[in-house]
Image: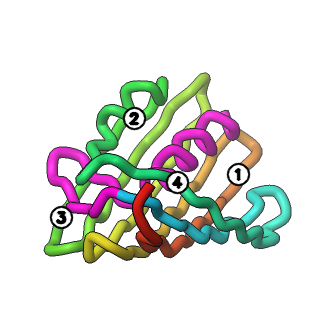
Amino acid sequence: MRSKCLIVAGVLVLIPFASGAAELEIKPGLWETTMTRTNPMTGEPTTETTTECVRETSFNPSEVMQDAEGCELVKEELDGDTLTFRMECNMQGSQTTVDGMFQTDSVSGKGNMDMNMDMGEMKMQMNMNWTSKRVGDC
């Protein structure tokens, strides 16, 4: 359960700016993303920077969600250059809620996601914050 939700979160972070039916515009190119996330077991923060070639001018996470078995995008609101969303997952009795925000001006952006996992007796929380910027062509 934990690894599947982390994969979904990771996919969403690798494409820095996502939305459902409403899309945020991004400029294709080489994007650098710095992400800080908390370890759900210890609460300790970990920061990493990745670089990815983004070819899309926008992205629809509904396509990603099709691969996330047991997960559903239940809320999305686009207000100018800011998208907020909620995703709920139910896999083998484990519940996970992901609330997030993406903001972009097409060449830079920021966002966050809060994941709350309920696995019966065990509850975990993971927070992710990131900044992204276009650093050049691919």
Q: For the magenta stretch, what is the residue range? A: 1-28
Expressed as whole percent of the image width and height from the top left, the position of residue 112 reads 48, 69
User: From the viewer's perspective, is the residue at label 4 or at label 2 nearer?
Assistant: 4
Give the spatial CA distance, label 3 vs label 4.
25 Å
Give the spatial CA distance, label 1 vs label 3.
30 Å
Give the spatial CA distance, label 3 vs label 2.
19 Å
User: From the viewer's perspective, is the residue at label 1 or at label 3 nearer?
Assistant: 3
Q: Amino acid at mark 4?
A: Glu
Crowd band around label 4 with a 10 angstrom C-alpha radius: few (<14), some (14–19), many (20+): some
In this rendering, the answer to whether 57 lies above or below 110 is above
Q: Amino acid at mark 3?
A: Leu
Mark 4 or mark 2: whose residue is earlier in sequence: 4
Give the spatial CA distance, label 4 vs label 2.
17 Å
Say which residue appears at 30% left-offset and 37% top-offset: 62
The residue that mark 2 highlights is 64
Which quadrant of the rendered structure holds the N terminus?
top right
User: At numbered mark 3, what does the secondary structure look like: helix, strand or loop?
Assistant: strand
Q: Nearer the viewer, residue 101 or 55?
A: 55
Q: Nearer the viewer, residue 37 or 94?
A: 37
Give the spatial CA distance, label 1 vs label 2.
25 Å
The residue that mark 4 highlights is 52
In this rendering, the answer to whether 77 lies above or below 119 is below
Residue 135 colored magenta?
A: no
Expressed as whole percent of the image width and height from the top left, the position of residue 130 reads 53, 71
How many numbered discs?
4
Mark 1 or mark 4: whose residue is earlier in sequence: 4
Say which residue appears at 58% left-offset and 55% top-offset: 116
The residue that mark 3 highlights is 78
Which quadrant of the rendered structure holds the C terminus?
bottom left
| Tag 1 near tag 3, CB within 8 Å | no
